[in-house]
Amino acid sequence: MAQAKFMKLQISDFWKGLLITIGTAIGTALIKYLDSGQFPATWGDWKMILFPALSAGIIYILKNLITNTKGKLLKKEKDD
């Protein structure tokens, strides 16, 4: 699948960002669960898991927004 041009996003960028967000949340919860032996039960516990996961997804989307089709940061496409 082709990458989006500089300062543009494709719908696949959203889905990949969502996958990173969900994967980070599940991985964090699993590590926390295995480490403590207790499943996160309170909003405070889940907040510690979900906020970093949401941050990872947002950073992924921002990275895609500021890279061009060649993967170069902050570089516009060359007109060929």
Image (cartoon, rainbow, N blue to C red):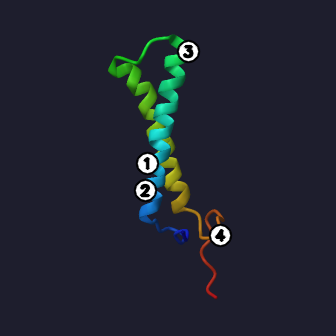
Cα separation between marks 2 and 3 = 31 Å
Task: Give the class, few, some or many, for how many residues have Cα within 10 Å of label 3's Cα (few <14, many ≥20).
Answer: few
Number of the front mark, 1 or 4: 1
User: In the image, what residue type sits under mark 2?
Assistant: Phe
The amino acid pointed to by label 4 is Lys
Residue under pointer 4: 70
Disc sitting over residue 14 in the figure:
2
Quarter that holds the N terminus? bottom right
Q: Which mark, by number, is residue 18?
A: 1
Residue 42 in the image, given as x and y percentages of width and height:
34, 17
| Structural crowding at the residue carrying mark 2, measured as other residues with C-alpha within 10 Å and reported as few (<14), some (14–19) or many (≥20) | some
**Tag 3: residue type?**
Asp
Q: Secondary structure at mark 3?
A: helix
Q: CA distance from mark 1 to mark 4?
A: 23 Å
Indicate which disc, 2 or 4, sits on the residue closer to the N terminus: 2
The residue carrying pointer 4 sits among few (fewer than 14), some (14 to 19) or many (20 or more) residues within 10 Å by Cα, namely few
Q: Nearer the viewer, mark 4 or mark 3?
A: 3
- Check contact, mark 1 vs mark 2: CB within 8 A: yes
Q: CA distance from mark 4 to mark 3?
A: 41 Å
Cβ–Cβ below 8 Å for labels 1 and 4? no
Residue 6, horizontal then vertical, whole percent: 54, 70
Could you tell which of marks 3 and 1 lies nearer the N-terminus?
1
The answer to whether residue 52 shows anywhere in this view is no
Which one is earlier in the sequence, the residue at label 2 or at label 3?
Answer: 2
Earlier in the chain: of badge 1 and badge 4, it is 1
